[in-house]
Image (spheres, helix red, strand yellow):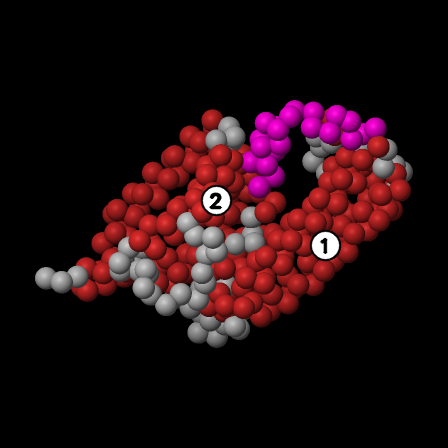
Amino acid sequence: MIVSLLLIGGIRESARVNAIMVILKIIVIILFIVVGVFYIRPENYHPFLPHGFKGVVSGAAVAFYAYIGFDAVSTAAEEVKQPQRNVPIGIIGSLLIATALYIALSAVLVGIVKYTKLNVADPVAYALHFIHQDWVSGIVSLGAVIGMTTVLIVFLYGGTRLVFAISRDGLLPQLFSRLNPKTHAPAVNTWVFGIVGSIFACIIPIDKITELVNIGTLFAFAMVSIGIVFLRQNPAFKDLDSAFKVPLYPVLPIVSFILCITLMLELKAFTWIAFFVWLLIGLCVYFSYGYRHSVVRLRYQKDQPK
């Protein structure tokens, strides 16, 4: 709820706070890598793929959670100076930096402690306790709290901007696209996100939340990927001016769609059941309200020859 209040204060203020916390988080990650690299035991890397390639794919389906948030940059396109230049740089640049840090941290972590002992809530802090570097462990634990706070900021920001855009296009009530006159932030849907997120955090175990977020995001990415193929063929959209062009069309969107579905198939049965329930609720909202109020659909019908 505090994060919701921060976001209502305006994008500049929340971005400034987020930037400070991200810098602290990166410093903590680098500190762990620098300290831990001297305690790596090469025998901990054997076997390198204990569960084979199948294990890699299954792990990727869960670890995908760590890569959610880069897409939030695209939801900020309307609030960015020179979006054609800065949005791709923001997405690709942050993805490359974070990926490099993830790989380095993971390599050091499993080099310090055998992977079989890392099924704990705080593996990095545990590894530092394991090598008797308790002073670093306290700093890393604080960094983890800061890191989770930055994730909350990005998730809440991205979600509220998506709902804002969807509401503005008529697929949800206009109430969700109303802006605070002073800060120009979508206040109503920010509070709704904060309240709903707080309730879910209280009643749903973290492992279930992780998989539910993963399957929902993977499905959204899959639909966006395959949707590009159909939109490029649609005469109503294919000739519109576009600020962004997908490279290697249509190969890249199709490959993206296939990979997203592949990762979804690795998730548990419970996750799929919850996903279909949630999807059914969304479809009910769409056909009972969104379909009839869609600005794009109404404009498209209006432009069609009689």
> Where in the figure is residue 284, as x and y percent of width and height?
29, 43
Secondary structure mostly seen in magenta is helix
Secondary element type, mark 2: helix
- Secondary element type, mark 1: helix
Query: x, y (%) of residue 15?
Result: 60, 65
Residue at the far left in the pictured view: 306
Residue 179 visible? The answer is yes
For disc 2, the marked residue is: 256
Kindly identify which residue carries mark 1.
25
User: Dividing the picture into quarters, in which one does residue 274 lie?
Assistant: top left
Along the viewing direction, whichever of 22 and 242 lies nearer the viewer: 242
Magenta includes 51? yes
On the picture, is 203 further left or further right than 237? right
Measured from the top left, where is residue 33 in percent x and y?
A: 80, 47
Is 285 above or below relative to 170? above
Amino acid under disc 2: Ser
- Mark 2 vs mark 1, foreground winner is 2
Distance in Å between CA atoms under marks 2 and 1: 30 Å
**Residue under the point 78% across and 47% down:** 140
Circle 1: residue type: Lys
The span picked out in magenta is 43-64
- Assess disc 1: are there few (<14), some (14-19) or many (≥20) residues with their C-alpha within 10 Å of its C-alpha: many
Of 178 and 23, which appears nearest the observer? 23
CB contact under 8 Å: marks 2 and 1: no
